[in-house]
Image (cartoon, helix red, strand yellow):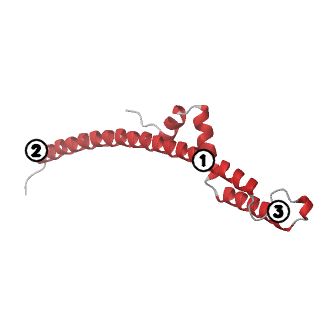
C-alpha cells in the first residue's frame, strides 16, 4: 500500500470553479478583507457626511446606495462561504480516508512485527540455556 498525500488527492478532485471558490473563501476570511471593507465603509460614510453637499452621492442618514451595495456583498458572500465550508468538509473526508488507510497499514505492520518477535522469542528459548 502506497501512502499518498491527502492534500494532493484533494486538489486533484477539484474543478476550476471549486478552486476559485476555495481561493475566494480563503481571501474573504482574512483580516485584510475585513480592513478593506472597514476602510471602504469609513470612506463612503465619511465622504457622504463631510464632503460638500454638491459632491455627496449617497445622502446622510439613509445611505441607501451603501446599504444596497453592502447587502449585495453579503448576498454573494453567504453562498460563497457555504461552498467553502463544503469544500473544507470534502477535504476533511479525503484526509480521514487517507488516515484510515495509513492506520490499516500500520496495524498490519504491527501485527507482522508482533509475529516476528514471537518467533524470535521462541527461537531464543530453544537456544539459550535456562537459568
Label 1 vs 3, first from the N-terminus: 1
Percent position (x, y) of residue 103?
33, 43
Label 1 vs 2, first from the N-terminus: 1
- Which-is-in-front pick, marks 1 and 3? 3
Looking at the image, residue 53 lies above or below residue 88 = below
Instruction: Give the CA distance from mark 1 to mark 2.
Output: 66 Å
- Give the residue drawn at x 22%, y 41%: 116
Cβ–Cβ below 8 Å for labels 1 and 2?
A: no
Question: SS for tag 3?
Answer: helix
- Give the residue drawn at x 42%, y 37%: 3
- Which-is-in-front pick, marks 1 and 2? 1
Percent position (x, y) of residue 130?
7, 54
Horizontal placement of 43 versus 23: left or right? Answer: right
Which one is nearer the viewer's eye here, 36 or 43? 43
Question: SS for tag 1?
Answer: helix
- Give the residue drawn at x 61%, y 54%: 29
Q: Label 3: few (<14), some or many (≥20) within 10 Å?
A: many
Percent position (x, y) of residue 112?
24, 39
Mark 1 = which residue? 25
Mark 2 = which residue? 126
Mark carried by residue 48: 3
Could you say which quadrant of the image residue 46 lies in? bottom right
Instruction: Give the CA distance from mark 2 to mark 3.
Output: 94 Å
| Quadrant location, the N terminus | top left
Amino acid at each position: 500500500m502506497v501512502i499518498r498525500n491527502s492534500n494532493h488527492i484533494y486538489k486533484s478532485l477539484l474543478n476550476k470553479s471549486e478552486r476559485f471558490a476555495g481561493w475566494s473563501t480563503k481571501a474573504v476570511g482574512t483580516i485584510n478583507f475585513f480592513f478593506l471593507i472597514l476602510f471602504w465603509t469609513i470612506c463612503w460614510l465619511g465622504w457622504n457626511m463631510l464632503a460638500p453637499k454638491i459632491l455627496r452621492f449617497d445622502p446622510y442618514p439613509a445611505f441607501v446606495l451603501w446599504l444596497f451595495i453592502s447587502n449585495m456583498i453579503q448576498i454573494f458572500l453567504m453562498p460563497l462561504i457555504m461552498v467553502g465550508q463544503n469544500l473544507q468538509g470534502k477535504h476533511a473526508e479525503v484526509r480521514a480516508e487517507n488516515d484510515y488507510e495509513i492506520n490499516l497499514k500500520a496495524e498490519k505492520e504491527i501485527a507482522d512485527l508482533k509475529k516476528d518477535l514471537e518467533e524470535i522469542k521462541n527461537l531464543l528459548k530453544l537456544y539459550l540455556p535456562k537459568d
